[in-house]
Image (cartoon, rainbow, N blue to C red):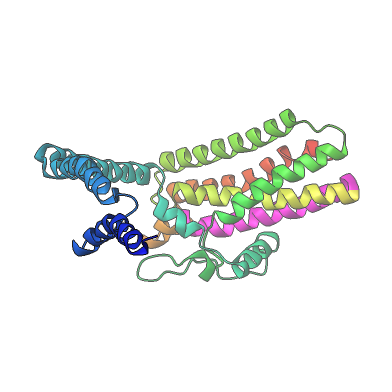
Amino acid sequence: MDYSNQSGFRQRKLQPKVRMRGSAVDSGEPSQLFDDTSAGHNAGHSGVDKGPMVYAGQSLLSDPVSNLAMAYGSSLASQGKEMMDKNLDRFIPISKLKYYFAVDTVYVGKKLGLLVFPYMHENWEVSYQQDTPVAPRFDVNAPDLYIPAMAFITYILVAGLALGTQNRFSPEILGMQASSALVWLIIEVLAVLLSLYLVTVNTDLTTIDLVAFSGYKYVGMIVGVLAGLLFGKMGYYLTLLWCCASIFVFMIRTLRLKILSEAAAEGVLVRGAKNQLRMYLTMAIAAAQPVFMYWLTFHLVR
């Protein structure tokens, strides 16, 4: 058997395979099992999607009509905010309300003591700093709205407690109690404003001052009702009598500096019809406090 011929045949049979491999190597291109289509896909995706998005944003920003509409809308919003602030400050003076709530714990304690024991207090004038009254936390004589507001809410809660101990509590009755107290407070303030106008008193008393002074009586009402719950009717009457006398003295000594300030500046003494009217008005406002205190609490103690 000729082995040389067989070896030659084998070489000729394997030669094409070697050449095929050699062609891939000789061309200098790496062999890949799969085609890389990611680059083409991303390029196509970015070419299709990003183009319109960029074009729409540029057209929106470069459109003069859109810019004009945005500027006009912002100017309208700022003008509306200004108008609302002016009208709100006209009816509800927010800046002044901040002054009446500028209190601290020391002031609240001193003021409550002054409302219940006003007999030993001597100086009743409000301190001023550069023609402006100082904040209540710096002067116990300055009016505030914190104590009247908290006292009003506490009075409603104490009234509900008193009605509950007598098995007469219901949301409707408690709502009527709160509404009645609020309506009487508004009537009282309006009556005082009308009286000041009729008497032609030029005073620095404001409506908020009158609300504050009229709201101080709720402190004595709370003390009276609590005394009635603890000690019965006798405790209620004795405590309420003390609180009524205290609020009367407090109102007389506070309001006389406000209502009679014009007469003192003009050098007018207690004589004269005009000054007499002012004195009577001061006493009437002070005397109305015990009447309201009894009217709003006598039915809560049995």
Q: Is residue 52 left or right of residue 261?
A: left
Image coordinates for residue 119, horizontal then vertical, percent = 67, 65
Q: Does 71 sit left or right of 177 as displayed?
A: left
**At 71% from the left edge and 54% from the top edge, which residue is drawn?**
245
Dividing the picture into quadrants, the one containing residue 2 is bottom left
Q: Is residue 189 above or below residue 9?
A: above
x and y, in percent, of residue 252 in the image: 58, 55
Please identify the quadrant where the N terminus is shown.
Answer: bottom left
Asked if residue 67 is among those painted magenta in the image, a careful observer would answer no
Q: Main secondary structure of the magenta part?
A: helix
Residue plotted at (22% across, 48% down): 43
Query: If the image is split into quadrants, where does the C terminus sit?
Result: top right
- Determine if residue 216 is in view: no
Examine the rendered structure and indicate whether residue 204 appears above or below residue 197.
below
Magenta-drawn segment: 232-260
Q: Nearer the viewer, residue 135 or 271?
A: 135
Say whether residue 152 is visible.
yes
* Residue 142: percent from left, percent from top: 51, 62
Is 245 on the left or on the right of 122, as rendered?
right
Which residue occupies the foreground of this view, 168 or 286?
Answer: 168
Figure label count: 0
- Please say whether residue 257 is one of the residues in the magenta stretch: yes
Q: Nearer the viewer, residue 98 or 182?
A: 98
Residue at screen point 17% across, 38% down: 69
Which of 16/183 is in front?
16
User: Where does residue 138 sit, x and y in percent of width and height?
Assistant: 51, 71
Residue lying furthest top: 172
Task: Say above or below: 199 vs 268.
Answer: above
- At x 28% / y 42%, what residue is drawn? 83
Q: State the residue lying farthest toward the front.
A: 1
Q: Is residue 38 above or below residue 21?
A: above
